[in-house]
Amino acid sequence: MSETLQIQLDAVLLERIRRVAQARGWSDAVAIRHLVEHGLFAVEPRGEPSLNDADAGILQSAIAALEGIPDDPGFSLIGRASGDQAG
């Protein structure tokens, strides 16, 4: 890819870029470079945590166990004195 890149930006996006540039005291080109760099960081994988097969299996088992706990309307009353009402 060449160092010079021609792209078409709609007027709304271009105005947003110009506002960022003006607020930071940057030229439009510098603002675009910063915004592209930061946008790439936002969408590129950066060593994001992942589970190996054993960990994933343990987590699935734990979730299944939690899902197997029956609904108990009394659970929300734990720690409240009888006759107390939430408020």
Image: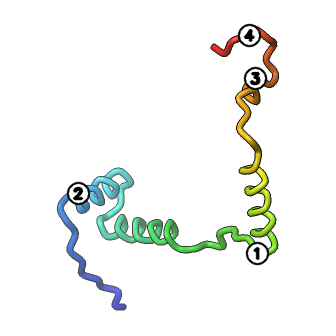
Cβ atoms under marks 1 and 2 closer than 8 Å: no
Rendering quarter of residue 28 = bottom left
- How many neighbours does mark 3 have within 10 angstroms: few (below 14), some (14-19), or many (20 or more)? few
Relative vertical location of residue 20 with respect to residue 77 in this rendering, above or below? below
Query: What amino acid is at disc 2?
Result: Glu
Circles 4 and 1, Cβ within 8 Å, touching? The answer is no
| The C terminus sits in image quarter | top right
Question: Hey, which residue is sitting farthest bottom in the picture?
Answer: 1
Q: Which residue is drawn at 75% across and 50% down?
A: 68
From the image, tell me which residue sits under label 1: 52
Q: Determine whether 30 is above or below 69 in the image.
A: below
Q: What element carries label 2?
A: helix
Looking at the picture, tell me which residue is in the foreground, 77 or 38.
Answer: 77
Cα separation between marks 1 and 2: 45 Å
Mark 2 — residue?
15
Residue 58 placement (x, y as % from top left): 81, 65
Give above or below for 11 relative to 87: below
- How crowded pointer 2 is (Cα within 10 Å; few <14, some 14-19, many 20+) is rated as few
Left or right? Give the position of 69 relative to 36.
Answer: right
